[in-house]
Image (tube, helix red, strand yellow):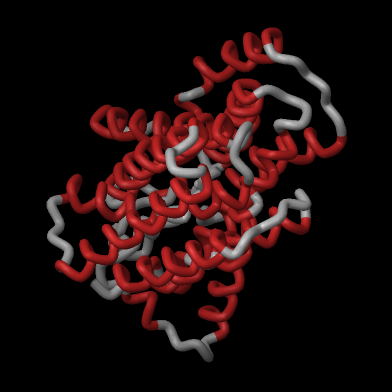
Amino acid sequence: MRAQDSATADDTIAVSGAAGPRREGADAAGSAHDPAPAAGTAHDPASAASAHDPAARSGTLLAALGVVAFSLTFPGTAWALEGLGPWSVTTCRVVLAALVAGSALLARRAAPPERRHWPGLLVVAAGVVVGFPLLTTLALQTSTTSHAAVVVGLLPLTTAVFSAVRTGARPSRRFWAAALTGAAVVIGFAVQQSGGTPTTGDLYLFGALLVCAAGYAEGGRLARSMPGWQVIGWALVACVPVAVPGAAIALYAEPVHLGGRAVAGLLWLAVGSQFVGLVVWYRGMAAIGVARASQLQLAQPLLTLVWSVLLLGEHIGPAAPIAAVAVLVCIGVTQRG
């Protein structure tokens, strides 16, 4: 829910990464799919931009709009599931998003990635393009969007851990203490909500955290050597040979009852979460820096809780917002740890 379903420069799309540094005069390596960016970043010159600078204010607004777009991913998935099966939602979302990404790559005349980049791109495709959307969609068949939002709120911490392992970084003890505390909060919340044992939906969500974090960490590494928006663009295009026949099979095998909400949900997932949201997020992140932008995305789980009430009529008990705020505090500590 990621995310997750989870920013581009030059009116195209960008990938979210782990805690990657900005490239001089090019793209920032940050996270930008349905879910959140990695917590804890390297020093980012853009993050020092003055709050009174018009460019900084504009960048903050764009990044905030990206966060709003991503926070609607789980409600959009819930709407799409009203008319399509989980496999149909996932594959059709990938096909539509790949059409948008392919058009952007053609319009910008982007050169194909070097051969050495393709293994990493396949990791991004498996984790961000397919794994996270599929697992969160399966989870939302039995879990509420508010429950999923709290669990997936752990994604920045999970991504930071994968990034540290992948890049050999050595975060402080305070970082690891906050990460483990955040994980304990989410696990405790999931167990409390399910009556003592994790549900199948919880297992899907925890699996989504792992595969998406791996994709984000790899995307952040790739974005240091190629434009960030092209990472997610080529990852989407790489999925077309599998997604197109997969969509045909899924639409044939699963019931289809398209209504207004189902169509709106699917279009939002493909265009809003994976394109428009990425456009404004990445442009905002390029203006204000990864560190400042990631602070804005800490509000994403709480926004999703609001949408779950307003758009889906879900009832939220006190445990969900309390857990979401606790995770937000842990992520804030990792930003400084």
In depth, the one of 174 and 121 nearer the eye is 174
> Along the horizontal axis of the image, is 207 left or right of 236?
left
**Given the current orientation, which residue lies at the most extreme right position?**
260
> Along the horizontal axis of the image, is 183 left or right of 235?
left
Image label count: 0
Please give the name of the residue rendered at 51% of the width and 56% of the height, measured from the top-left corner. 9
Please give the name of the residue rendered at 13% of the width and 51% of the height, measured from the top-left corner. 168
In depth, the one of 221 and 205 nearer the eye is 205
Report x, y in % for residue 160: 29, 55
- Residue 194 vs 97, above or below: the answer is below
Report x, y in % for residue 77: 66, 39
Residue 231 in sight in this render: no
Report x, y in % for residue 263: 79, 34
Residue 172 in sight in this render: yes
Report x, y in % for residue 218: 30, 42
Please give the name of the residue rendered at 54% of the width and 79% of the height, measured from the top-left corner. 55
**Given the current orientation, which residue lies at the most extreme front position?**
195
Please give the name of the residue rendered at 26% of the width and 72% of the height, measured from the top-left corner. 43
- Residue 163 vs 141, above or below: the answer is below
In depth, the one of 219 and 179 nearer the eye is 179
Of the 4 image quadrants, the one containing the N terminus is: top right
> Along the horizontal axis of the image, is 161 left or right of 113?
left
In depth, the one of 93 and 250 nearer the eye is 250
